[in-house]
Amino acid sequence: MVAFESFILTRLQELSALHTKQYLGDRSQYIGASDIGHCPRKVVLSKLNGEEIDLATHIKFMRGHLAEDLVAGIYEKYNPQRQVELELDDPVPIKIHLDLLFQPTTKQEVGVMEVKASSIPETPYELWEMQLHFQMGVMARHTQKAIKGAIIVVDLNDGDIRRFNGYTPNETIFNGLLKRAKHIWDCITEGTEPETEVTPLCGYCAFIKDCPRFQADEIPELAGDVLKVLEAKDRKKASEAEYKRLASRLLDIVKKKGAFKAGGHRIDKIDRHSTRTDWKKLADDLGTINKSLDDYQTKNPYSVLDIKTLQ
Ligand code: SF4
Protein backbone atom coordinates (compact mmCIF):
# COMPACT_ATOMS: atom_id res chain seq x y z
CA MET A 1 0.00 0.00 0.00
CA VAL A 2 1.38 3.40 -0.95
CA ALA A 3 2.22 5.87 1.82
CA PHE A 4 -0.80 8.11 1.16
CA GLU A 5 -3.32 5.25 1.36
CA SER A 6 -1.63 3.91 4.46
CA PHE A 7 -1.85 7.36 6.08
CA ILE A 8 -5.56 7.62 5.17
CA LEU A 9 -6.29 4.12 6.50
CA THR A 10 -4.55 4.84 9.81
CA ARG A 11 -6.40 8.13 10.20
CA LEU A 12 -9.77 6.56 9.39
CA GLN A 13 -9.07 3.77 11.87
CA GLU A 14 -8.40 6.40 14.54
CA LEU A 15 -11.57 8.32 13.70
CA SER A 16 -13.63 5.15 13.64
CA ALA A 17 -12.20 4.03 17.03
CA LEU A 18 -13.03 7.45 18.45
CA HIS A 19 -16.60 7.29 17.13
CA THR A 20 -17.05 3.76 18.53
CA LYS A 21 -15.68 4.78 21.92
CA GLN A 22 -17.80 7.95 22.02
CA TYR A 23 -21.12 6.46 20.91
CA LEU A 24 -21.09 2.68 20.75
CA GLY A 25 -18.73 1.42 23.47
CA ASP A 26 -17.59 -2.22 23.44
CA ARG A 27 -19.83 -3.78 20.79
CA SER A 28 -18.84 -7.31 21.83
CA GLN A 29 -20.73 -6.82 25.11
CA TYR A 30 -24.21 -6.30 23.70
CA ILE A 31 -26.45 -6.90 20.70
CA GLY A 32 -27.17 -3.73 18.74
CA ALA A 33 -29.79 -2.93 16.14
CA SER A 34 -27.26 -3.10 13.33
CA ASP A 35 -26.40 -6.69 14.36
CA ILE A 36 -29.96 -7.86 13.99
CA GLY A 37 -30.34 -7.87 10.22
CA HIS A 38 -27.00 -9.53 9.47
CA CYS A 39 -26.11 -13.18 9.13
CA PRO A 40 -25.80 -14.56 12.72
CA ARG A 41 -22.49 -16.34 11.98
CA LYS A 42 -20.94 -13.12 10.69
CA VAL A 43 -22.12 -11.19 13.76
CA VAL A 44 -20.93 -13.86 16.21
CA LEU A 45 -17.48 -14.17 14.61
CA SER A 46 -16.97 -10.42 14.34
CA LYS A 47 -17.90 -9.99 18.02
CA LEU A 48 -15.63 -12.83 19.11
CA ASN A 49 -12.66 -12.14 16.83
CA GLY A 50 -13.03 -8.54 15.75
CA GLU A 51 -13.19 -7.71 12.09
CA GLU A 52 -10.47 -6.27 9.93
CA ILE A 53 -11.93 -3.29 8.13
CA ASP A 54 -10.37 -2.21 4.85
CA LEU A 55 -10.04 1.30 3.48
CA ALA A 56 -13.13 1.06 1.24
CA THR A 57 -15.33 -0.03 4.16
CA HIS A 58 -13.96 2.74 6.38
CA ILE A 59 -14.85 5.29 3.70
CA LYS A 60 -18.36 3.78 3.46
CA PHE A 61 -18.74 4.19 7.23
CA MET A 62 -17.65 7.82 6.95
CA ARG A 63 -20.21 8.31 4.20
CA GLY A 64 -22.82 7.15 6.71
CA HIS A 65 -21.70 9.80 9.25
CA LEU A 66 -21.79 12.50 6.54
CA ALA A 67 -25.32 11.51 5.53
CA GLU A 68 -26.39 11.64 9.18
CA ASP A 69 -24.90 15.14 9.62
CA LEU A 70 -26.70 16.29 6.49
CA VAL A 71 -30.10 14.94 7.59
CA ALA A 72 -29.64 16.28 11.14
CA GLY A 73 -28.97 19.70 9.60
CA ILE A 74 -32.06 19.47 7.40
CA TYR A 75 -34.29 18.66 10.40
CA GLU A 76 -32.49 21.01 12.79
CA LYS A 77 -35.53 23.15 13.53
CA TYR A 78 -37.33 20.05 14.90
CA ASN A 79 -34.53 19.59 17.47
CA PRO A 80 -33.63 15.96 16.79
CA GLN A 81 -31.50 14.19 19.39
CA ARG A 82 -28.62 12.27 17.87
CA GLN A 83 -27.20 8.84 18.67
CA VAL A 84 -29.63 8.30 21.52
CA GLU A 85 -28.71 5.17 23.43
CA LEU A 86 -31.40 2.90 24.89
CA GLU A 87 -30.91 -0.39 26.71
CA LEU A 88 -32.97 -3.48 27.30
CA ASP A 89 -32.13 -6.46 29.49
CA ASP A 90 -34.00 -9.24 27.90
CA PRO A 91 -31.95 -11.15 29.46
CA VAL A 92 -29.76 -10.63 26.42
CA PRO A 93 -27.92 -7.32 26.83
CA ILE A 94 -29.36 -5.09 24.12
CA LYS A 95 -28.25 -1.58 23.33
CA ILE A 96 -29.54 0.49 20.46
CA HIS A 97 -28.41 3.83 19.08
CA LEU A 98 -31.01 5.92 17.32
CA ASP A 99 -29.60 8.08 14.53
CA LEU A 100 -32.24 10.75 15.08
CA LEU A 101 -34.96 10.90 17.72
CA PHE A 102 -37.74 13.48 17.59
CA GLN A 103 -39.59 14.08 20.87
CA PRO A 104 -41.80 17.14 20.47
CA THR A 105 -43.09 18.09 23.93
CA THR A 106 -46.38 19.25 22.42
CA LYS A 107 -47.25 15.91 20.85
CA GLN A 108 -48.12 12.47 22.11
CA GLU A 109 -45.78 10.83 19.61
CA VAL A 110 -42.09 10.36 19.01
CA GLY A 111 -40.23 9.86 15.76
CA VAL A 112 -37.37 7.44 15.17
CA MET A 113 -35.31 8.03 12.06
CA GLU A 114 -32.65 5.73 10.64
CA VAL A 115 -30.29 7.36 8.14
CA LYS A 116 -28.64 5.40 5.34
CA ALA A 117 -26.03 6.50 2.83
CA SER A 118 -26.71 4.45 -0.25
CA SER A 119 -28.00 4.49 -3.78
CA ILE A 120 -31.77 4.69 -3.49
CA PRO A 121 -33.59 1.37 -3.89
CA GLU A 122 -37.19 1.00 -5.11
CA THR A 123 -38.17 -0.32 -1.69
CA PRO A 124 -36.12 -0.31 1.53
CA TYR A 125 -33.86 -3.30 2.09
CA GLU A 126 -35.12 -5.91 4.55
CA LEU A 127 -31.95 -5.39 6.61
CA TRP A 128 -32.83 -1.71 7.13
CA GLU A 129 -36.42 -2.50 8.07
CA MET A 130 -35.34 -5.14 10.59
CA GLN A 131 -33.00 -2.59 12.17
CA LEU A 132 -35.74 0.02 12.40
CA HIS A 133 -38.28 -2.45 13.81
CA PHE A 134 -35.76 -3.49 16.45
CA GLN A 135 -35.18 0.15 17.39
CA MET A 136 -38.91 0.90 17.57
CA GLY A 137 -39.49 -2.25 19.65
CA VAL A 138 -36.88 -1.17 22.21
CA MET A 139 -38.17 2.41 22.13
CA ALA A 140 -41.68 1.12 22.85
CA ARG A 141 -40.35 -0.31 26.14
CA HIS A 142 -39.18 3.21 27.10
CA THR A 143 -42.15 5.40 26.23
CA GLN A 144 -45.93 5.45 26.42
CA LYS A 145 -46.13 7.74 23.42
CA ALA A 146 -47.01 6.56 19.91
CA ILE A 147 -43.90 5.79 17.83
CA LYS A 148 -43.45 6.61 14.19
CA GLY A 149 -40.47 5.29 12.27
CA ALA A 150 -38.77 6.36 9.06
CA ILE A 151 -35.76 5.43 6.98
CA ILE A 152 -34.13 8.26 5.10
CA VAL A 153 -31.69 7.39 2.33
CA VAL A 154 -29.10 9.85 1.05
CA ASP A 155 -27.38 9.12 -2.23
CA LEU A 156 -24.20 11.14 -1.85
CA ASN A 157 -22.99 10.17 -5.32
CA ASP A 158 -26.05 11.21 -7.30
CA GLY A 159 -27.21 13.95 -4.92
CA ASP A 160 -30.57 12.35 -4.19
CA ILE A 161 -32.55 11.82 -1.00
CA ARG A 162 -35.67 9.79 -0.22
CA ARG A 163 -37.72 9.02 2.84
CA PHE A 164 -39.56 5.75 3.48
CA ASN A 165 -41.94 6.32 6.35
CA GLY A 166 -45.16 5.13 7.96
CA TYR A 167 -43.47 2.48 10.12
CA THR A 168 -44.93 1.66 13.52
CA PRO A 169 -43.79 -0.86 16.15
CA ASN A 170 -44.99 -4.41 15.60
CA GLU A 171 -44.86 -6.74 18.58
CA THR A 172 -44.76 -9.92 16.47
CA ILE A 173 -41.84 -8.69 14.39
CA PHE A 174 -40.04 -7.43 17.49
CA ASN A 175 -40.43 -10.78 19.28
CA GLY A 176 -38.96 -12.51 16.23
CA LEU A 177 -36.01 -10.11 16.30
CA LEU A 178 -35.52 -10.70 20.03
CA LYS A 179 -35.25 -14.43 19.26
CA ARG A 180 -32.54 -13.63 16.72
CA ALA A 181 -30.73 -11.54 19.34
CA LYS A 182 -30.94 -14.42 21.82
CA HIS A 183 -29.61 -16.92 19.28
CA ILE A 184 -26.60 -14.66 18.54
CA TRP A 185 -25.94 -14.06 22.24
CA ASP A 186 -26.20 -17.78 23.10
CA CYS A 187 -23.67 -18.58 20.38
CA ILE A 188 -21.28 -15.99 21.80
CA THR A 189 -21.63 -16.99 25.43
CA GLU A 190 -22.13 -20.75 25.10
CA GLY A 191 -20.07 -21.43 21.99
CA THR A 192 -22.98 -22.99 20.06
CA GLU A 193 -22.92 -23.00 16.26
CA PRO A 194 -24.51 -19.88 14.77
CA GLU A 195 -26.95 -20.07 11.87
CA THR A 196 -25.81 -18.87 8.49
CA GLU A 197 -27.75 -16.72 6.06
CA VAL A 198 -26.50 -16.53 2.52
CA THR A 199 -27.24 -13.22 0.79
CA PRO A 200 -25.40 -11.10 -1.78
CA LEU A 201 -23.84 -9.31 1.25
CA CYS A 202 -21.66 -12.40 1.78
CA GLY A 203 -19.25 -10.65 -0.61
CA TYR A 204 -18.51 -8.18 2.20
CA CYS A 205 -18.11 -10.87 4.87
CA ALA A 206 -14.64 -11.28 6.36
CA PHE A 207 -15.50 -14.88 7.34
CA ILE A 208 -16.46 -16.23 3.92
CA LYS A 209 -13.24 -18.21 3.46
CA ASP A 210 -14.15 -20.92 5.94
CA CYS A 211 -17.91 -20.43 5.84
CA PRO A 212 -19.58 -23.86 5.66
CA ARG A 213 -22.13 -22.52 3.18
CA PHE A 214 -19.44 -21.71 0.66
CA GLN A 215 -17.71 -25.10 0.77
CA ALA A 216 -20.17 -26.49 -1.80
CA ASP A 217 -19.99 -25.88 -5.56
CA GLU A 218 -23.57 -24.77 -5.73
CA ILE A 219 -25.14 -21.98 -3.63
CA PRO A 220 -28.89 -22.27 -4.29
CA GLU A 221 -29.73 -19.17 -2.20
CA LEU A 222 -27.99 -16.98 -4.77
CA ALA A 223 -29.95 -18.32 -7.76
CA GLY A 224 -32.45 -15.44 -7.61
CA ASP A 225 -29.65 -12.85 -7.58
CA VAL A 226 -27.91 -14.49 -10.55
CA LEU A 227 -31.20 -14.26 -12.49
CA LYS A 228 -31.55 -10.59 -11.54
CA VAL A 229 -28.03 -9.86 -12.82
CA LEU A 230 -28.79 -11.66 -16.10
CA GLU A 231 -32.05 -9.73 -16.49
CA ALA A 232 -30.24 -6.44 -15.83
CA LYS A 233 -27.62 -7.42 -18.42
CA ASP A 234 -30.36 -8.11 -20.99
CA ARG A 235 -31.99 -4.75 -20.18
CA LYS A 236 -28.62 -3.01 -20.62
CA LYS A 237 -28.14 -4.73 -23.99
CA ALA A 238 -31.67 -3.77 -25.06
CA SER A 239 -31.20 -0.16 -24.00
CA GLU A 240 -27.84 0.03 -25.80
CA ALA A 241 -29.54 -1.31 -28.96
CA GLU A 242 -32.35 1.23 -28.53
CA TYR A 243 -29.78 4.03 -28.11
CA LYS A 244 -27.96 2.97 -31.29
CA ARG A 245 -31.21 2.86 -33.25
CA LEU A 246 -32.41 6.31 -32.09
CA ALA A 247 -28.97 7.96 -32.32
CA SER A 248 -28.38 6.70 -35.86
CA ARG A 249 -31.55 8.44 -37.05
CA LEU A 250 -30.37 11.81 -35.68
CA LEU A 251 -26.87 11.19 -36.98
CA ASP A 252 -28.26 10.60 -40.49
CA ILE A 253 -30.03 13.98 -40.29
CA VAL A 254 -26.84 15.76 -39.15
CA LYS A 255 -24.82 14.05 -41.90
CA LYS A 256 -27.24 15.25 -44.56
CA LYS A 257 -28.31 18.62 -43.17
CA GLY A 258 -25.55 19.65 -40.73
CA ALA A 259 -25.83 20.57 -37.04
CA PHE A 260 -29.20 21.71 -35.71
CA LYS A 261 -30.87 22.75 -32.45
CA ALA A 262 -33.79 21.04 -30.74
CA GLY A 263 -35.21 20.90 -27.22
CA GLY A 264 -32.49 23.14 -25.74
CA HIS A 265 -29.71 21.03 -27.26
CA ARG A 266 -27.33 21.36 -30.17
CA ILE A 267 -27.15 18.21 -32.24
CA ASP A 268 -23.95 17.68 -34.19
CA LYS A 269 -21.53 14.96 -35.15
CA ILE A 270 -17.91 14.31 -34.28
CA ASP A 271 -15.78 12.84 -37.04
CA ARG A 272 -13.39 10.13 -36.03
CA HIS A 273 -11.50 7.37 -37.70
CA SER A 274 -10.38 3.92 -36.79
CA THR A 275 -6.93 2.72 -37.87
CA ARG A 276 -6.10 -0.73 -39.15
CA THR A 277 -2.45 -1.76 -39.39
CA ASP A 278 -1.31 -4.56 -41.68
CA TRP A 279 1.14 -6.04 -39.18
CA LYS A 280 1.80 -9.10 -41.34
CA LYS A 281 2.95 -7.06 -44.34
CA LEU A 282 4.98 -4.82 -42.05
CA ALA A 283 6.72 -7.88 -40.55
CA ASP A 284 7.35 -9.35 -44.01
CA ASP A 285 8.92 -6.09 -45.24
CA LEU A 286 10.89 -5.47 -42.04
CA GLY A 287 14.54 -4.65 -42.75
CA THR A 288 14.14 -4.82 -46.53
CA ILE A 289 12.05 -1.83 -47.54
CA ASN A 290 12.36 1.68 -46.17
CA LYS A 291 8.74 2.55 -45.40
CA SER A 292 7.02 4.33 -42.50
CA LEU A 293 4.27 2.88 -40.29
CA ASP A 294 1.73 5.07 -42.11
CA ASP A 295 2.35 3.07 -45.27
CA TYR A 296 0.86 0.01 -43.59
CA GLN A 297 -2.15 1.71 -42.06
CA THR A 298 -5.66 2.18 -43.45
CA LYS A 299 -7.85 4.85 -41.88
CA ASN A 300 -11.61 4.28 -41.83
CA PRO A 301 -13.59 7.45 -41.11
CA TYR A 302 -16.84 7.36 -39.09
CA SER A 303 -19.00 9.83 -37.19
CA VAL A 304 -20.60 9.75 -33.75
CA LEU A 305 -23.57 11.76 -32.56
CA ASP A 306 -22.80 14.72 -30.32
CA ILE A 307 -25.55 16.31 -28.23
CA LYS A 308 -24.68 19.39 -26.15
CA THR A 309 -27.02 21.18 -23.78
CA LEU A 310 -27.45 24.85 -24.70
CA GLN A 311 -26.95 27.31 -21.85
S1 SF4 B 1 -20.19 -15.82 4.10
FE1 SF4 B 1 -22.34 -15.27 4.25
S2 SF4 B 1 -23.31 -17.04 5.22
FE2 SF4 B 1 -21.12 -17.21 5.58
S3 SF4 B 1 -20.77 -16.21 7.53
FE3 SF4 B 1 -20.43 -14.67 5.99
S4 SF4 B 1 -22.39 -13.65 5.78
FE4 SF4 B 1 -22.79 -15.57 6.83
Image: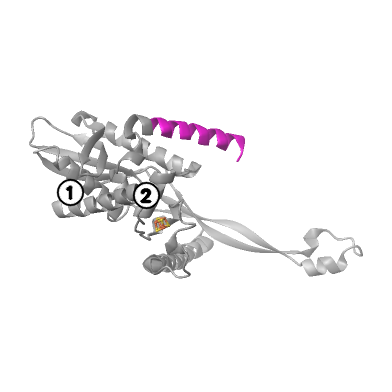
Dot 1 amino acid type: Tyr
Question: What predominant SS class does the magenta segment belong to?
Answer: helix
Asked whether residue 254 appears in the rendered view, the answer is: yes
Q: Nearer the viewer, residue 174 or 231?
A: 174
Measuring 15% from the left and 55% from the top, which residue is drawn there? 172
Q: Which residue is farthest front? A: 190
Q: Residues within 10 Å of mark 1 (few under 14, many from 20)?
A: some
Q: Position of residue 177 (x, y in %)?
A: 23, 52
Q: Residue at x 86, y 61 (%)?
A: 291
Distance CA(mark 1)–CA(mark 2): 29 Å
Residue 167 is tagged as 1
Query: What residue did someone put label 2 on?
Result: 44
Q: Give the magenta part as a residue range.
A: 1-19
Q: Nearer the viewer, residue 41 or 257?
A: 41
Q: Is residue 197 left or right of residue 211?
A: left
In the rendered image, residue 15 lying in the magenta stretch gets the answer: yes
